[in-house]
Image (cartoon, helix red, strand yellow):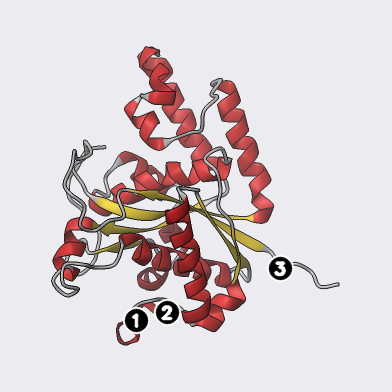
């Protein structure tokens, strides 16, 4: 009987609107405009630990709704009760939330696309109808997660958070396209990023399974994604900086010469596609 290979699970959430040509609406308080897919990498064998830490945290704070980053930051919807806490109690909540994120045996990874930069670069090239941002972000994020799994001699499960039938079907089609055709980018420009071949994807990708918001791992992906996005614009952002200093981001486990092809990808941020270290809100 063949043994099942050890697996790494990639839990993904999305952030922002995936339509490149969306009509400008109310901007987020931080003033940035991105689309991102990503979240956390965790080995199968470590999930029990992460689930226990999540369970302990929500039990202590008597939380009955999923941990949702936007609601927690905005103190609204399921986390409206945070507004009633005394300052010291609120600070304890945020600190314990961060410590739960830090102590879970996970690594943060994403693909983040600056919408304005993307449209500047590709709108004219594609006659005002560039790719959906999720197509680019999914291919980039899953390829980099695959490289992480390959380096660890593991298979990779891809577990996006469930959205709606149409968007879920798109992600599944992107997954299948990686297996059949590899990344959907022009082959002449991928040398810098050492693109995986379809054969490498087929030997690494093990499963695709959608997850509900009730999944503790999906909630951790949501909690990690926002600071990773903010790090592209403002490396001094406190949640991003703390995760980086505590070794919780993929950049922390890679050598500098591996960042171009394996680290979180910040696309279309500037001409060199390096994260802007501009000042911004925490």
* Residue positioned 86% across, 72% down in the render: 1
Cα distance between the residues tagged 1 and 3 = 29 Å
- Secondary structure under tag 2 reads loop
What residue occupies the far bottom of the structure in this picture? 188
> Mark 2 highlights which residue?
195
| Residue 8 x %, y % | 60, 60
| Mark nearer the N terminus (1 vs 3) | 3
| Residue 257 x %, y % | 38, 73
In this picture, is 159 found above or below 191?
above
Residue 269 appears in which quarter of the rendering? Answer: bottom left
Q: Do the residues labelled 2 and 1 touch (CB within 8 Å)?
A: yes
Q: Residue 190, labelled with which disc? A: 1
- Secondary structure under tag 1 reads loop
> Mark 3 highlights which residue?
5
| Residue 63 x %, y % | 53, 24
Residue 129 is at least partly visible in this image: yes
Report whether 72 appears left or right of 17.
right
* Residue positioned 35% across, 66% down in the render: 136
Q: Exactly how many numbered labels are in the figure?
A: 3
Residue 271 is at least partly visible in this image: no
| Mark nearer the N terminus (3 vs 2) | 3
| Residue 42 x %, y % | 58, 54
Cα distance between the residues tagged 3 and 2 = 23 Å
* Residue positioned 64% across, 48% down in the render: 47
In this picture, is 161 found above or below 139?
above
In this picture, is 226 found above or below 198?
above
* Residue positioned 36% across, 40% down in the render: 239
Instruction: Decide: few, some or many residues near mark 2? Use Cα within 10 Å; few <14, some 14-19, many ≥20.
Output: some
């Amino acid at each position: 009987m063949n043994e099942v290979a050890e697996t790494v699970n990639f839990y993904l959430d999305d952030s922002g609107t995936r339509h490149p040509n969306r009509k400008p609406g109310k901007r987020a308080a931080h003033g940035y405009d991105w689309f991102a897919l990503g979240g956390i990498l965790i080995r199968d064998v470590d999930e029990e630990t992460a689930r226990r830490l999540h369970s302990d945290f929500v039990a202590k704070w008597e939380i009955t709704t999923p941990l949702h980053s936007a609601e927690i930051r905005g103190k609204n919807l399921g986390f409206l009760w945070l507004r009633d806490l005394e300052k010291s109690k609120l600070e304890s909540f945020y600190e314990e939330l961060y410590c739960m994120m830090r102590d879970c045996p996970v690594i943060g990874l994403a693909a983040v696309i600056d919408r304005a930069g993307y449209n500047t670069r590709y709108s004219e090239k594609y006659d005002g109808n560039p790719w959906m941002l999720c197509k680019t972000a999914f291919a980039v994020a899953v390829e980099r997660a695959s490289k992480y799994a390959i380096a660890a001699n593991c298979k990779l499960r891809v577990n996006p958070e469930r959205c709606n039938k149409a968007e879920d079907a798109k992600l599944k089609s992107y997954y299948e396209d990686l297996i059949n055709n590899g990344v959907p980018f022009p082959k002449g420009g991928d040398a810098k990023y050492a693109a995986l071949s379809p054969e490498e994807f087929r030997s690494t990708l093990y499963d695709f399974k959608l997850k509900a918001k009730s999944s503790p791992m999906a909630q951790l992906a949501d909690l990690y994604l926002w600071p990773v996005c903010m790090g592209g614009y403002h490396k001094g952002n406190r949640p991003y900086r703390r995760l980086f200093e505590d070794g919780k981001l993929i950049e922390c486990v890679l050598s500098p010469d591996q960042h171009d092809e394996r680290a979180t990808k910040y696309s279309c941020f500037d001409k060199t596609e390096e994260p802007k270290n501009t000042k911004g809100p925490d």
